[in-house]
Image (cartoon, coloured by chain):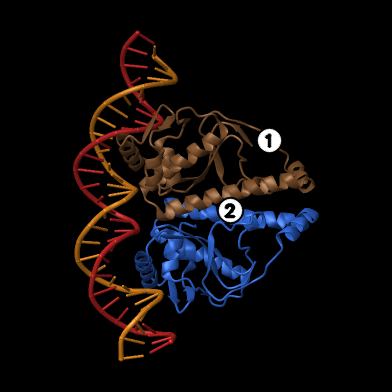
Chain colours: A blue, B brown, C orange, D red
Amino acid sequence: MLCYGWVFRIAQLGDGRRQILSVLLAGDLFSSRMIFSESAEYSFQALTHVRFARFDRNDLRAAMVANLELFDAFAQVCANERRAADELIIDLGRRNAEERIARLILHLTGRIGERTIVRESCYPFPLRQNDMADILGLTSVHVSRVITKFRKAGLIEYSGGNLRIMRPQELAELGRLI
Amino acid sequence: MLCYGWVFRIAQLGDGRRQILSVLLAGDLFSSRMIFSESAEYSFQALTHVRFARFDRNDLRAAMVANLELFDAFAQVCANERRAADELIIDLGRRNAEERIARLILHLTGRIGERTIVRESCYPFPLRQNDMADILGLTSVHVSRVITKFRKAGLIEYSGGNLRIMRPQELAELGRLI
DNA sequence: CGATCGGTTGATATGAATCAACGTGCGTGG
DNA sequence: CCACGCACGTTGATTCATATCAACCGATCG
């Protein structure tokens, strides 16, 4: 379980293309799948300094069978992971670059907000534009253009690893969240 | 659980865009998530005539806690669903139309082959080109062009709800599976 | 001080979308 | 039994979103 920092789960293709499959924040399991099978199947990549905790696979399985609440909590975690994957599929399949980026920002800041106190909509945001590109199936050049546009429209501020949302309403409209 | 036929799990966007999130074949659970929560969250759509079986949510949960093998089998199902979702994310994020279509064909025929006897690499394949487009984030027009190209190259035959793979080797190369 | 990394910007290329017309098979109602 | 409409696919012309290539900038770091 990740206790501190940011981690990506990634797939690296033969020819250098990279796809980030999910972003882990403090409190997330590295992989619910890893609890059952030895192989991680994809690799992980730390974006920041990181702290994490280990569990014994068999202990956890035993505890889940013994304790129904833990079992349900774990099922809930799996369901959330799945929902996030579905959302990403929809983004990649059917939304354009502006929508994708607006949604990614809102999705991540939402998750950060669940974990830490946020003041004045200013979030720690260590993703590079290149990372956003590799989540969203775009190039970093294009991400830069869209972000610049958002910035010029006064929607966000984004520098030095921090992101501030100036107009959440308009950003949500751009992402078709309304 | 689906017993016979083909079903899509889909997301329908406000403006008519559709994204198919997964394709269910005989033996698949409609949603591993549905076992824990009431809401299906997305909708399902039958592509063919269909037969299915129902389980009582609570019976199944009880059985899983009581029977470790069932528990593991279920975990395995979840893991497979997850892997398929990851693959789709990689396709949508980082592969072009030819790769996507070649991979979809190989993925589906592989799954069909696990379930039925296949003669002369000829598979039942009720997907319309429009459905493939909605899985792969393309338009049906573009799918048509690529399929026509595959056909002219002698890679596949595809008509009347059947698909035959003439040159699996070359198709796999196109999909970067080799 | 040079090297490297992340980001910006412009010019150009390209894959896929869009628009449009047409064909063909099929089911259905008259 | 025919005529019509509809679903699905094909094909061509054109447009558009995003990629690619390239130059450059500022910050950071050894």
The crowd level at tag 1 (other Cα within 10 Å; few <14, some 14-19, many 20+) is few
**Residue at mark 2: chain:** A
The location of residue B83, given as percent across then percent down, is 55, 50
In the picture shown, does residue B21 fall above or below B121? Answer: below
SS assignment at label 1: loop
Between the C-alphas of marks 2 and 1, the distance is: 22 Å
- Disc 2 designates what residue? A82
Query: A143 or B4: nearer the eye?
Result: B4
- Disc 1 designates what residue? B54
Which amino acid, mark 2?
Answer: Arg
Query: D23 or B103: nearer the eye?
Result: B103
Residue A98 appears in view: yes
Residue sitting at x 69%, y 57%: A74
Residue sitting at x 61%, y 41%: B30
**Residue at mark 1: chain:** B
In the picture shown, does residue A12 fall above or below A3? Answer: above
The location of residue B120, given as percent across then percent down, is 45, 28
Residue sitting at x 62%, y 48%: B78
The location of residue B161, given as percent across then percent down, is 44, 29
Residue B16 appears in view: no
Which amino acid, mark 1?
Answer: Arg
In the picture shown, does residue B97 fall above or below A136? Answer: above
The location of residue A65, given as percent across then percent down, is 77, 53
In the picture shown, does residue B89 fall above or below B112? Answer: below
